[in-house]
Structures are given as C-alpha cells and as structure tokens.
Image (tube, helix red, strand yellow):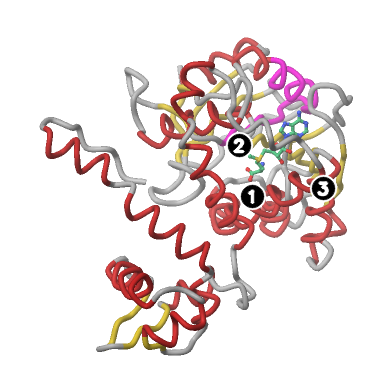
Amino acid sequence: MSEIASIRNFDQFRDAVFAFRLPRILLSAIELDIFTVMGRTTWTVRQLANALSASERGVEILCRNLATAGLLKKQGPRYRASPLAQHVLNANSPTYRGAYLDLLRRQWEDWSHLTQAVKTGKPVDDKEPETPEYRRAFTWAMHQRSIESAREVASQLDLSGARSLLDVGGGPGTYALAFLRKNPQLHATVMDRPAALEVAKEIADSRPQRARLHLYPGDLFTTPWPQGFDVVWISNVIHIYSAAENIRLLRLAKQALNPGGRLLIQDTFLTDKEGLRPAEANLFAVTMLLFTETGNTYHVREVLAWLKTVGCTSQRLIKLKPGTGDWEGVIVEGSAGKRRGTSREPRPEKARSSR
Ligand SMILES: C[S@@+](CC[C@H](N)C(=O)[O-])C[C@H]1O[C@@H](n2cnc3c(N)ncnc32)[C@H](O)[C@@H]1O
C-alpha cells in the first residue's frame, strides 16, 4: 500500500476519516455477491436489482460507485463486471478468492471494536476460537493471499545450494511449493497445526512437487521440531507473537539448521529510524492487537538483534525487486555459521549487510 499522507488541516482529517466509504462499498458488494451474480453478462440496474433481491435505488448507487472504482464497466444504462471482478471476485470462476474475501469481510465488525482493544490490550474476537474449521478457512485465505507473492519470492531467492527447507508455520504450503517448483533438488517440510496441513495436502496433491513435500503436524512451542535443514523459512509468523516468544521460536529455528544453514524471516517490518514507516507495518500491528494475544510488528533492527541473540553468526537484509514479494519485499536472514569443509558464498541476491 502507499504511504499515509500527513494530516495538516481539518479538511485532510475529514477526508482521512471518510476514506472508510470505499472499503465499506466494496465489502457490501462482496456481501451481496454482486460479481458472482453478474458473471460475464451485461445488466441493467433493474435486472440486477431483481437478481440480487435488492432495491433499484440502492443497486444504482452501488453500481455507479463500483464503476468509479473500476470494478464495473458502465456503458449507458448497462453495467458489466471488469475482468478482475469476473475472475477473483466471482464464485463461479476457478480463480475466485472467496476464503480471503471472507476473511476481509469479517474484519469490518472487529475493527469497529478497536477502541475497546486499545483500552484492554486484548483481542476482540474471542468468539472465534482456534477450531479446525476456523483454521481450515484461514489457511485457504492465506493460500489465496500469497499465490503471486510466493512465486515472486521463490524466483528471487537463490536456494540452489540447499537440499532441505523447513517452512515454519507454513500453513497452506504455498511458499514451500513455490520453492520446490523453482528448485528441483530441494525437499521441503511444512510444520503447522493439523487442520492447516490438511489444506496444504489438498493443494499439494495435484502438484508434481508433492513427492518432495513433507507435512509435519504440531505446535511450534510444544512439539519437538524436525532437524537438519539447510534453510528454515519463517513467513508471517513472528507478527503473531511477542518479542520473547519470537526469540524462543528463532532459537528453535537455529537449532533445526545444518551448519552453514540459512534462517530466512519474511514479514512486514518497520524500517525507518523512528519506527513509523512503512505505514503498512504499523497498520498491521493494529490487526494483531485486534486478533492476537501478544502479536505486533517489529523493526528490522530488533529482528536482526534477535538473530544475534540466538547465535546466528551473521545477519543481513535481503531486498526483493521493488513492488514484488510479500509486504514491502524485505527478508531478514541469519546464518548458522560456516558449512563444514566448504566456503560457499556469495549468493547473488541483492543484500545489505547489517554490520
Ligand atoms: C499468517 S499464517 C502464515 C502462513 C504462511 N507462512 C504464509 O506466509 O502465507 C501463520 C501460520 O502460522 C501457524 N502457526 C502460528 N502459531 C503456531 C503454533 N503455535 N503452532 C503451529 N502453527 C502455528 C498458523 O497455523 C498459520 O498457518
């Protein structure tokens, strides 16, 4: 997302508050399932209102706004869905991202309780327990969220020297599969909760990489980790936990590495001096306040220091090509010392040493 402009006068304050209007319009369109109903057909407002069992007045105003946002094309009195809406927002399309849309839709209500979360420091969504059903739906949403970014990350990270990778909290296995696709010599193990790994299995079963993918059910804090990996990949996990919990996780990750192994952490990181930018990293911390007991987002400085604390011999930042990868395309790497009997290096990714 783009950076947030500073608010310097009341008009800018009002506009910033009113920015909730478009998100609310988009969520109502999803709740009405308007893009599935429209499919690839052209509609008058009256036809569409009938099909949606909604008022003509409401549908006319909604459609005008969706057309302004580029999700509908308007031709005189008729509307049709844009190519994007016909694919990812249409339940009859094989590329529909319904699980992720559902996750977004349900956040509106939870975000309305932010004031309470700020007061208590506790998540608001305690009606949503950790059930297998919830975990399945969430894991599908994670897959739909990261299909493109996983491919981009896999294409830019050089794992050609690795034979084994552990994807910690790998959920649907989207990243593990992307790494396997790019690196035919690699075997990958996804460690996550059993319900998440059921989804990973369903996704992987139709892929040629399945034979090189291993699923390891367990809890990251209580199940002994598998050992002996050239790479440990931790994507979008550290924001769920506190600094102290993350140091525990990184210690376990470091222990799971072979000598010379690489610990790679992907997340949304703060990168500026004061810890205010990128804006997305701070906005996402609010999501963690609303939905987790101890989660937050962290400055790259802090994560690099954790890696040092757990005994990584060097630490660095890998920057992906601008506009690619997950979040802002920053990956934090720690190294588990030198590989026995070899002096491999350097790797061609664009890297900046942290010291
Ligand atoms: C936000 S998702 C990220 C999924 C994937 N790594 C990605 O980047 O798209 C976090 C994952 O970590 C898993 N996870 C978090 N805490 C865990 C724990 N204590 N034990 C096992 N898995 C855990 C969740 O089940 C979930 O699949």
Q: In which quarter of the image is residue 170?
A: top right
Circle nearer the N terminus (1, 3)? 1
- Element class at badge 2: loop
Identify which residue, 213 or 59, lies in the foreground. Answer: 59
Identify which residue, 247 or 49, lies in the foreground. Answer: 49
Name the residue located 51 percent from the left edge and 34 percent from the top edge: 287
Identify which residue, 282 or 306, lies in the foreground. Answer: 282
Residue topped by disc 1: 142
258 inside magenta stretch: yes
Q: Where is residue 145 in the image (x, y as percent from the top left)?
A: 57, 53
Name the residue located 34 percent from the left edge and 47 percent from the top edge: 20
- Would you say the beta carbon of the disc 2 residue lies within 8 angstroms of ligand 1? yes
74 inside magenta stretch: no
Residue topped by disc 3: 197
Q: Kindly report the distance in space between the C-alpha atoms of the residues bearing marks 2 and 3.
A: 16 Å
| Callout 1–callout 2 Cβ contact below 8 Å | yes
Under mark 3, the amino acid is: Leu
Name the residue located 71 percent from the left edge and 34 percent from the top edge: 232
- Element class at badge 3: helix
On screen, residue 286 versus residue 256, left or right, reads left
Residue topped by disc 2: 236
